Amino acid sequence: RSGGPANALILENCVLPGDLGKRNTSPGVDASHAQLERLTFCDCIVSGVELSGAVINGALELDGIRGPSDRDPCWVKARGARVGRSLSARKSKLRQPWPGATNWPPDESGWQNLTGPFALDLAGAEIGGSLTLWPEFEAIGGVSISGATIGEGLKASGARLDAADLGNSNDALFAQYARISGPVFLDKDDERP
């Protein structure tokens, strides 16, 4: 559609498995370069969400997303995305699709130009509001906010961030050249066991 962004897209309790191939590296949702007023995933089972280059004028909510099982991938790639308001991933369980011994880069399209994968890849993203990775957020494969701009702070209290250890992805939180205005909370969450 031309002439401006589409209305809000709200997905609740959906199952979006993507290609169930050998590693499930294709996204269940590909909205790369989309223009939306708002995008919400609430308690969805999804293999991956591709949002690179997307423009979301309002909020981006990735709350409660997870893979079909604890061992299945659920990743979000939003490199260079622009979010006008806040981005949240409350109670989300993300996992990048490669085991630690995988040779990098892989043959799968959409991944060859990356120095390494992250479960949540926000490299170069612009977030007008806050980035909320709390409560009960997990990223098995780490989070990249490298080169990102976050307007109102980062809250990741009690988040579980595990490095991917593939290619150059050996950081649980990769924040090189990130610009964050407002408070940053990376402490242990006392409410979480």
Image: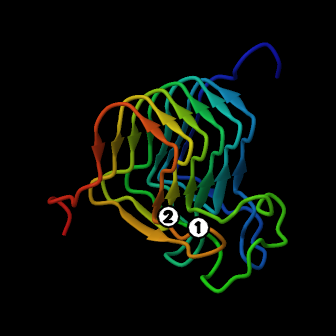
In the image, taking residue 44 as reference, residue 26 lies left or right, namely: right
In the image, taking residue 60 as reference, residue 36 lies left or right, namely: right
Q: Where is residue 171 drawn, in percent x and y?
A: 49, 66
Q: Nearer the viewer, residue 121 or 135?
A: 121
Q: Residue furthest front?
A: 177
From this view, report whether residue 5 is shown above or below residue 166. above
> Label 1 to label 2, Cα distance in Å?
8 Å
Which residue appears at 84% of the width and 62% of the height? 109
Q: Identify the mark nearer the N-term, 1 or 2.
A: 2
**Residue at the disc numbered 2:** 142
Q: Where is residue 167 drawn, in percent x and y?
A: 66, 72
Q: Residues within 10 Å of mark 2 (few under 14, many from 20)?
A: many
From this view, report whether residue 83 is shown above or below residue 88. above
Mark 2 lies on a secondary structure that is loop
Q: Which quarter of the rendering shows the C terminus?
A: bottom left
Amino acid carrying label 2: it is Gly
Mark 1 lies on a secondary structure that is loop
Which residue appears at 72% of the width and 59% of the height? 114
**Residue at the disc numbered 1:** 169
